[in-house]
Amino acid sequence: MNKSELVAAIAERADISKTDADAAVSALCDVMEDVVAKGGGKISVSGYFSVERTNRAARMGRNPQTGESIHIAASKGIKMSAGAKLKNAAKSA
């Protein structure tokens, strides 16, 4: 499902216009982006999902082609976890 299909489904279920549904989806994405960019918190929609920024430490790796040791710099990543309601929906499908 892409964004336009999601907007149409939300508009139909919530009985609102597609414009209002698109604004709500865009606002959710903006808020998630801001929280992840700042790295100071976690977004949690109980039962459905949680999203947070993670920090990966620098480490030594190995080039699989040459076997040479390489330094992998520290980086930031995203951790997204499914909640119990989503997991149960996947099991019952």
Image (tube, helix red, strand yellow):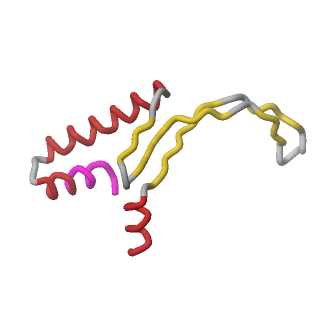
Displayed quadrant of residue 71: top right
Tell me the quadrant of the picture where the C terminus can be found: bottom left
Q: Main secondary structure of the magenta part?
A: helix
Displayed quadrant of residue 57: top right
x then y, percent, for residue 88: 41, 67
Q: Residue at x 85, y 47 (%)?
A: 65
x then y, percent, for residue 61: 81, 39
Q: Residue at x 40, y 39 (%)?
A: 43
Boundaries of the magenta span? 1-8
In this rendering, position of residue 2 left or right of residue 12: right
In this rendering, position of residue 69 left or right of residue 76: right
x then y, percent, for residue 78: 53, 39
Q: Residue at x 26, y 42 (%)?
A: 25
Tell me the quadrant of the picture where the N terminus can be found: bottom left
Q: Is residue 12 above or below residue 50?
A: below
Q: Is residue 63 above or below residue 75?
A: below
In this rendering, position of residue 4 left or right of residue 56: left
Foreground residue among 50 and 70: 50
Q: Residue at x 43, y 55 (%)?
A: 83
x then y, percent, for residue 40: 47, 27
Count of numbered labels shown in the rendering: 0
Q: Is residue 92 above or below residue 66?
A: below
